[in-house]
Image: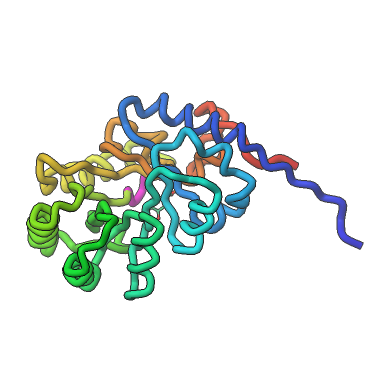
């Protein structure tokens, strides 16, 4: 017999959390991360709580398709970008923007531009400033930025966003986490062309270093009412999006 456990998903809590994060960040756009089916909450269940967001970020094209079917008309960003021609065509059809984190993905843009697509995506160029997961290494960063800048000007695509990921923003000890986040922020800002925007902060960054978030924050776990670090979500004024 199934155990009688009932989970209740509360879109109103997600909406309140997004507004709380907006309040903490001030003049920063908020792009919640709703990958993996909205961190397991179910995109269809939470969509009404996401309306206040400025954009949404997913990993999978399938997630973007569902968001468009649910009537989401604002930007959608694919956090790992496109991996083949089929992805690229689908991303265009869905009017997605996307992350570029390697040379192959940059080359793919040149091929795409020749097809003069009706939707001109906004590209988020990802730099590896210490997370060591994805992104251009510092030695390649300058050349990649210049190449994308020239490309977007030539084809009149939207001005790109320079992006990185804080590596230890959820570290318990503020004296450890802050200097490294500042170092990453400095590295990114030192390379960012003045007319580009920037995107640095996940949940921990948004909650712990709102002043280092850049122009577009990418909170994930926090919008569902949890924190990645040792401090309780309630201390930040966040409410649980799922209750039992
Ligand atoms: C690039 C990027 N930004 C932001 C996030 C959100 O992270 P968090 O849930 O820690 O806020 C993720 C999550 O995977 C991510 O990959």
Which quarter of the rendered picture does the N terminus lie within?
bottom right
- Report whether 62 appears left or right of 6: left
Q: Is residue 181 above or below residue 138?
A: above
Q: Is residue 96 left or right of residue 19?
A: left
Name the chief secondary structure element in magenta.
loop
x and y percent of residue 196 in the render? 16, 43
Q: Nearer the viewer, residue 14 or 171?
A: 14
- Look at 13% across and 57% down and name the residue there: 155
Quarter of the image with the C terminus is top right
Q: Residue at x 16, y 47 (%)?
A: 187
Residue 70 percent location from the top left of the image: 55, 49
Residue 170 in picture, x, y percent from top left: 42, 44
Residue that lies at the very extreme toward the right in this rendered image: 1
Residue 91: percent from the left, percent from the top?
37, 62
Tell me where residue 95 sits by quadrant: bottom left
The answer to which quarter of the image holds residue 215 is top left
Q: Is residue 72 above or below residue 119?
A: above
Q: In the picture provided, is 87 more to the left or to the right than 139?
A: right
Q: Is 113 part of what is drawn in magenta? A: no
Q: Is residue 167 magenta?
A: yes
Q: Is residue 46 above or below residue 37?
A: above
Residue shown at 48% from the left, 42% from the top: 229
In the image, residue 188 sits, relative to residue 87, either above or below, namely above
- How are the residues colored? rainbow
The magenta stretch is 166-171
Q: Nearer the viewer, residue 185 or 75?
A: 75
Q: Nearer the viewer, residue 37 or 76?
A: 76
Name the residue rendered at 45%, 48% in the picture.
33
Number of marks in picture = 0
């Amino acid at each position: 017999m199934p155990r009688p456990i009932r989970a209740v998903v509360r879109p109103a809590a997600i909406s309140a959390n997004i507004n709380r994060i907006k309040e903490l960040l001030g003049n920063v756009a908020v792009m919640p991360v709703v990958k993996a089916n909205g961190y397991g909450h179910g995109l269809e269940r939470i969509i009404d709580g996401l309306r206040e967001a400025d954009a949404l970020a997913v990993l999978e094209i399938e997630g973007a398709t569902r968001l468009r079917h649910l009537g989401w008309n604002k930007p959608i960003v694919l956090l790992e970008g496109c991996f083949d021609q089929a992805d690229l065509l689908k991303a265009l059809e869905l009017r997605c923007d996307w992350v570029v984190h390697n040379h192959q993905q940059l080359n793919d843009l040149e091929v795409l531009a020749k097809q003069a697509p009706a939707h001109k995506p906004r590209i988020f160029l990802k730099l590896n400033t210490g997370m060591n997961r994805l992104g251009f290494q510092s030695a390649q960063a300058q050349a990649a930025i210049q190449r994308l800048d020239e490309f977007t000007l030539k084809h009149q695509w939207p001005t790109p966003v320079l992006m990185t990921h804080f590596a230890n923003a959820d570290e318990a000890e503020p004296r450890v986490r802050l200097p490294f986040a500042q170092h990453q922020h400095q590295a990114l800002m030192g390379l960012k062309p003045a007319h580009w925007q920037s995107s640095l902060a996940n949940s921990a960054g948004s909650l712990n270093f709102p002043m280092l978030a850049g122009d577009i924050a990418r909170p994930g776990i926090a919008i569902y009412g949890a924190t990645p670090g040792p401090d309780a979500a309630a201390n930040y004024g966040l409410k649980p999006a799922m209750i039992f």
